[in-house]
């Protein structure tokens, strides 16, 4: 994903069709999620910056850390969803190469990592995000953030995230967040996660 985005923000196209993740995630959910929720954050962020020229050269990542709650939340909504949509793929492949080795080192196995990601999602109270990130020593860590907060980019390099807001799953799964997390992990884009690893 792009790490040098500035105002005016334009919505990223989904890297697959709306129905490409079915049956794990329905076309209906993807439509509302991408075209309504995500694009809503783009529109609101642009509106907020329209009359703040001094913020128009601030990169998206920095906007997600602003004190102004509206800017922070909407910038986070843009950033988090762009990583999320690129963290999914209709062409699932198990992690390979350097990522597979690092997963084995830090979690023991892919299954153990998946279990811990799902557990982090289940334990999250309210709306928020689960993240897989590299820490400063290059090891993988699972993190969670509330609402549209982002992780500490000075410390962590984000590789993959999972949206645990109800809008990500309620239409398909109602209250069964566990089923959603399982379905998402079956569509995880590990190649993209590996591309997001530091050199
Ligand atoms: Fe979302």
Image: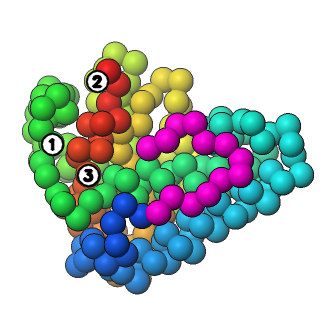
Query: Which residue position is annotated with label 1?
Result: 95
| Label 2 vs 3, first from the N-terminus | 2
**Location of mark 2 (residue):** 139
- Residue at 54% x, 42% y is 150
Which structural element holds mark 3? Answer: loop
Quarter holding the C terminus?
top left
User: What residue is shown at x 72% (from left), y 62% (from top)?
Assistant: 44
Distance Cα–Cα, label 1 vs label 2? 16 Å
Front position in the image: 44 or 116: 44
| Residue 6 belongs to the span the image colors magenta | yes
Tell me where residue 92 appears, x and y as whole percent. Answer: 17, 57
* Magenta run includes residue 85: no
Q: Secondary structure at mark 1?
A: loop
Nearer the observer: mark 1 or 2; the answer is 1
Q: Which residues are magenta?
A: 1-13
Dominant secondary-structure state across the stretch colored magenta: loop
Left or right, residue 104 beside residue 145: left
- The quadrant where residue 170 appears: bottom left
The disc at residue 73 is: none
Ligand 1 lies under 8 Å from the Cβ of mark 2: no
Q: Foreground residue, 80 or 143?
A: 80
Q: Residue at x 57, y 70 (%)?
A: 37
Can you give x and y, in whole percent of width and height, for residue 172 in the image?
A: 34, 81
Residue at the disc numbered 3: 189
Question: What is the secondary structure assignment of the residue under circle 2?
Answer: loop
Which of marks 2 and 1 precedes in the sequence? Answer: 1
* Disc 3: CA contacts within 10 A as few (<14), some (14-19) or many (>=20): many
In this view, the residue in front, 85 or 66, is: 85
Mark 1 to mark 3 CA distance (whole Å) = 9 Å
Q: Can you say whether 139 is above or below 61 in the image?
A: above
134 with respect to 9 (left or right): left
Q: Position of residue 75 (x, y in %)?
A: 65, 50
């Amino acid at each position: 994903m792009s790490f040098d985005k500035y105002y005016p923000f334009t919505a990223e196209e989904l890297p697959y069709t709306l129905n490409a993740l079915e049956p794990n995630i329905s076309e209906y959910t993807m439509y509302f999620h991408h075209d309504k929720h995500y694009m809503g954050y783009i529109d609101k962020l642009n509106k907020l910056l329209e009359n703040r020229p001094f913020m128009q050269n601030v990169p998206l990542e920095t906007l997600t850390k602003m004190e102004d709650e509206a800017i922070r939340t909407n910038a986070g909504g843009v950033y988090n969803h762009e990583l999320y949509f690129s963290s999914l793929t209709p062409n699932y492949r198990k992690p390979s190469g350097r990522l597979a080795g690092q997963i084995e080192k830090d979690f023991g196995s892919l299954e153990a990592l998946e279990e811990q990601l799902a557990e982090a999602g289940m334990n999250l109270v309210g709306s928020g995000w689960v993240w897989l990130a590299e820490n400063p020593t290059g090891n993988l860590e699972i993190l969670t953030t509330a609402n549209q907060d982002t992780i500490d980019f000075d410390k962590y390099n984000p590789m993959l995230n999972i949206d645990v807001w109800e809008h990500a799953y309620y239409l398909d799964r109602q209250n069964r967040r566990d089923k959603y997390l399982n379905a998402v992990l079956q569509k995880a884009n590990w190649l993209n996660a590996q591309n997001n690893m530091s050199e």
